[in-house]
Image (spheres, rainbow, N blue to C red):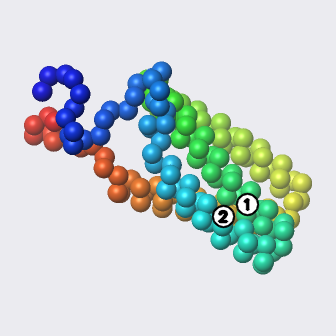
Amino acid sequence: MTGGAAPAGSGPAPAPRAGERGAIRARLPHLRLPLLACAALAVLGVPLAALLRGPTGAAGVAAGIGLVIVSYLVSSFSVAWADAVNPKLIMSVGLVTYATKMVFLGVVMSAVASAGWPGLPDMGVAIIAAVLVWIVAHVTWAWRAPLPTVDRATGH
């Protein structure tokens, strides 16, 4: 085949290039399942924390889950942006994003801990739970996703 559109059923279309409509969104299909899983965790965890630990516990659980979601979204969007602009940027943008997030999270958590907020233990448990839920959902998505492969024997 020489150029032109790929025939129907020949696999997924390539992601739009930088500047094209949907360039970043096309690189984020992996977010739906982890976001839904974290939403389910919040729907179950926040009322349970409210019942067991009161409003402060519920706020801690909500804050912990929200923090994990925001953290993963920042990473996903920054890497998707880098891929849309130039795939050679992915590693450096990903590492800078990660380092920046860790410093920011460390400063925020230190401030919360020094303030003596009683919801901190609940927030910590929720962070651990949300990270585990996100990772399991992301691995589940990756396991089921129709990812492209290369046949080394033919080069295709």
Q: Height in image: 31 above or below 117? A: above
Most distant residue in the front direction: 8
Q: Position of residue 107 (x, y in %)?
A: 77, 44
Give me the residue at 22% from left, 32% from top. 6
Using a 10 Å C-alpha cutoff, classify the residue at mark 1 as few (fewer than 14 neighbours), some (14 to 19) or many (20 or more): many
Circle 2: element type: helix
Q: Position of residue 100 (x, y in %)?
A: 65, 36
Q: Quadrant of residue 63?
A: bottom right
**Is residue 22 something one can see in this rendering?**
yes
Q: Position of residue 125 (x, y in %)?
A: 69, 66
Label at residue 62: 1
Circle 1: element type: helix
Using residue 150 as the reference point, say whether residue 77 is left or right of it: right
- Label pair 2/1, CB-CB below 8 angstroms: yes
Give me the residue at 78% from left, 46% from top. 108
Three-letter code, disc 2: Ala
Most distant residue in the left direction: 153
Q: Position of residue 151 (x, y in %)?
A: 16, 42
Q: Quadrant of residue 83?
A: top left
Q: Height in image: 62 above or below 82? A: below
**Is residue 88 something one can see in this rendering?**
no
Q: Which residue is mark 2?
A: 42
